Amino acid sequence: MTTWDRFVETFFNAKVMLKYLPDILSGMVVTIELAVLIVLSGLLAGLVLALLRALAIRPLNWLIIFVVDLFRSLPPLVIIVLIYFGLPAAGVSPSGFVSTWLSLAFVLMAFSEEIFWAGITSIPKGQWEASRSTGLSFGQTLINVVLPQALRLTIPPLTNRTIAITKGTALGTVVAVTEILGQASSAVSNSYNPSPLMMGAAAYLVLFLPVVVASRWIETKFAWKR
Amino acid sequence: MSNPIVDARAIHKHFGPLHVLKGVDLEVVERELVFVIGPSGSGKSTLLRCLNRLEEPSSGSVVVDGIDMLDPRTDINHARQRIGMVFQSFNLYPHMTALGNVTLALRKVAGKSRAEADALGLAALQRVGLADRAGHTPGQLSGGQQQRVAIARAIALEPRVMLFDEPTSALDPELVGSVLEVMRDLRQSGMTMIVVSHEMGFARNAADRVVFMDDGLIVEQGPPAAIFESPAQERTRAFIGQIQRH
């Protein structure tokens, strides 16, 4: 047996791969479900917080800034563990799936709020004044004039952050979520062979490469001539 | 004299420790074109912005077309439709077409349908000579064209008075004429206008009254000929002299 054969036998073992392919595929489904939930709820909550912050109600803004800074400082894994092992003490027992979803959604909410907020504040004051001078209300100006411009500015940092946080679904392994990495590592333990890990890596590429490419496309599509 | 459309009395404005307006009275009657001149920092723009409450006056009263602008019960968004404003930096919405810029308030504030708003918006663009640019975004227009779209955006709401805050100061010299041309047309159509500007030639030809401000106060006012040829106050004389040397 040559070295090359041994390498293939170890890392790309066809028999092992075939056996655990269904597990990896079901892991992909779980990862996709988690990712979609995290992205939708995290971005929506972040946008809502940024819009609330624009109302400039001081005590509310302190609260928003506190929550956002908290979730930006804590490692996502710590939040997952806190929710999964800590909440039962308060009488709520979220599953590993729910714990991972909530944790990463909170983190994405915090980061995206800051990005949305930076976008909103970067719109020149003159845009507000022009709109208000024609009789549009604060809310109408925010929705029709400021937000469409702010969102375009936020797309590049937002897609970056969204991808980074969504990849954190792998942390769900710790609380027994059967996503890609969880399936791959238990397959490795059962087969005494690291091939499933290679399948896991491939699965992440298959999932996230298109997202990265799509985000590039969105960035160019939404850029407009100034 | 008809009733004043704009009646501002004893306007004071503080920005922190800065006392920017120190008791300004300004009355403007229908169809009048009032030019406000003065050194930078004299409070001209602030006065203009107090009239539609983009700045909140610290004290005083502002009545525009019979509406008390400072009364908390006044629907300020409704009142502002009657007061068109044009800014030095145009402030067009970059993500909308020229027509979109003009029709936004028609649809959202005046409650017109899209078709009605588009018709009114095109008519307004026609008045500033830019109907053929309706589908262009601001980035595709020259500075002069952008400012004319901004004027169209204001006049589409059929305001009772128009405020111009240094409308030509950000323009290249060769583009100033087209904007002044539109303002001249507006004047001929009987629009009441208050103009803060350094275009003295335009003031001489078109203004009914020139108001000279310095240090937060109106120093002197009168017909353009009187203010430019024989100002009564020393400060006015010094300012006019400085301007005309250029």
Image: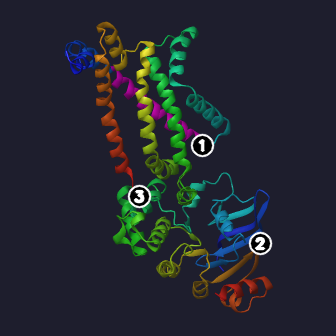
Span colored in magenta = A30-53
Label 1 and label 3 in one chain:
no
User: Is disc 1 placed on a helix, strand or loop?
Assistant: loop
Label 2 and label 3 in one chain:
yes
For the C terminus of chain B, which image quadrant? bottom right
Residue B224 at what x, y percent from top left? Answer: 66, 87
CA gap, disc 1 to disc 2?
A: 35 Å
Which residue in the structure is indicated by mark 2? B215
Frontmost residue, A95 versus A128: A95
Mark 1 belongs to chain: A
User: Is disc 2 placed on a helix, strand or loop?
Assistant: loop
* Residue A55: image tag: 1
Mark 2 belongs to chain: B
Frontmost residue, A102 versus A61: A102
Colour approach in the figure: rainbow
CA gap, disc 2 to disc 3?
A: 39 Å
Density class for disc 1 (Cα within 10 Å; few <14, some 14-19, many ≥20) is few
For residue B76, say whether it is visible. Answer: yes
Q: How many labels does the image show?
A: 3
Residue that protrudes farthest toward the bottom in the picture: B229
Residue positioned 47% across, 26% down in the render: A104
For the N terminus of chain B, which image quadrant? bottom right
Residue B134 at what x, y percent from top left? Answer: 36, 66
Amino acid, disc 1: Leu
Indicate whether residue B104 is drawn in magenta. Answer: no
Frontmost residue, A214 versus B37: A214
In contact (CB < 8 Å): disc 1 and disc 2: no
User: Is disc 3 placed on a helix, strand or loop?
Assistant: loop
Indicate whether residue A31 is drawn in magenta. Answer: yes
| Image: A101 above or below A127 | above
* Residue B96: image tag: 3
